[in-house]
Image (cartoon, rainbow, N blue to C red):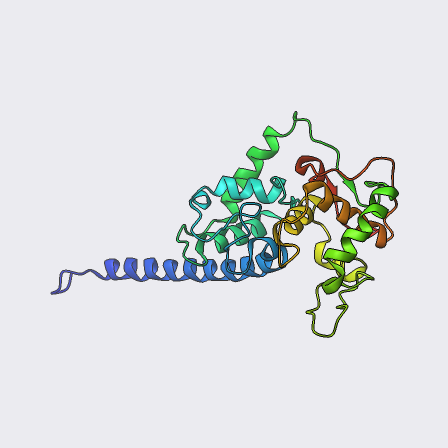
Amino acid sequence: MNRTGFSVAGAAGVILAVTAFGARAQDDGAAFDQGRTIYEQNCAQCHQPSGEGIPPSFPALAGNDNLEDPALIVNNVRNGRQAMPAFPDLGAEEIAAVATYVRSAWSNDYGAVSADEVSEILQTLDGEGEDGDQAAQTTIWDGVYTQSQADDARLIYIGACAACHGTRLNGAPAEADMGSGPPLAGPAFLREWGGRSVAALFEYTRSTMPQRNPGQYSDQQYADIIAYMLSYGDAPAGDTPLPADISELSNIIIEAEDG
């Protein structure tokens, strides 16, 4: 032991500890960046880039105490919840990354989540779901609306949506001084909403549209407008109208015709 009373072995231990902490911090930083990318691609449209959400349909994530529970985040990402679609294709590392991001971004300080933690939670969720009954999922190509429903909604669309989204649903404004809106049919729409549920589109639409008066129409009218959008995008009509029921809409997935 030297004069300071600090052994070489003790110094080595401190160096190893600092090195390990630095490695963990670097790993957490990489996970944060990966999670931010996943969030921006899949979550920001509804929960907003600022994490403020669009309450009550899409709750704020900034300052949300529920994020303290990693299992809740993992369950919601894997299985979906109400209007939030499921993301079954995300692996443990990706879920851990987005969980790390939402728990650490904005004003949140709940800390990182590791891929090992997520794997354990997923094993528990998979075990609980083995004997459970799950509603069969369909897609917009399975005849989820009626043609008469879509036809009846056309005038509502023209009056409420066409000024920004275009009469052809291509995002072209009807007037030069009107702001353009995103396309509501075609490849651009499918790229934006592909993989999400119709419930997410329904909640987003009735919470934010029309921009000057969100929530102006009844829930069924919003469902009817979506039926018109689907018909314009060449999704086939069926025998049952598209309902305004979140649980039923959650089982209808938006995707391209070839999946």
Quarter-wise, where is residue 129 in the image? top right
- Percent from the top left, x then y, of residue 71? 50, 39
- Percent from the top left, x then y, of residue 217? 68, 47
Q: Which residue is drawn at 39% across and 62% down?
A: 22
Image quarter of the N terminus: bottom left
Q: Is residue 153 left or right of residue 125?
A: right
Quarter-wise, where is residue 82 in the image? top right
Q: Name the residue furthest left.
A: 3
- Percent from the top left, x then y, of residue 232? 85, 54
Q: In this view, does 138 lie to the left or right of 101?
A: right
Q: In this view, does 183 lie to the left or right of 64?
A: right
Judge whether 21 appears above or below 247 on screen: below
Q: In this view, does 150 lie to the left or right of 26?
A: right
Q: Residue at x 41, y 54 (%)?
A: 108
Q: Nearer the viewer, residue 140 or 181?
A: 181
Q: Which of 210 and 112 is in front in this view?
A: 210
- Percent from the top left, x then y, of residue 74? 55, 43
Judge whether 229 appears above or below 120 on screen: below
Residue 190 in sight in this render = no
Quarter-wise, where is residue 162 in the image? bottom right
Q: Which of 228 and 110 is in front in this view?
A: 228
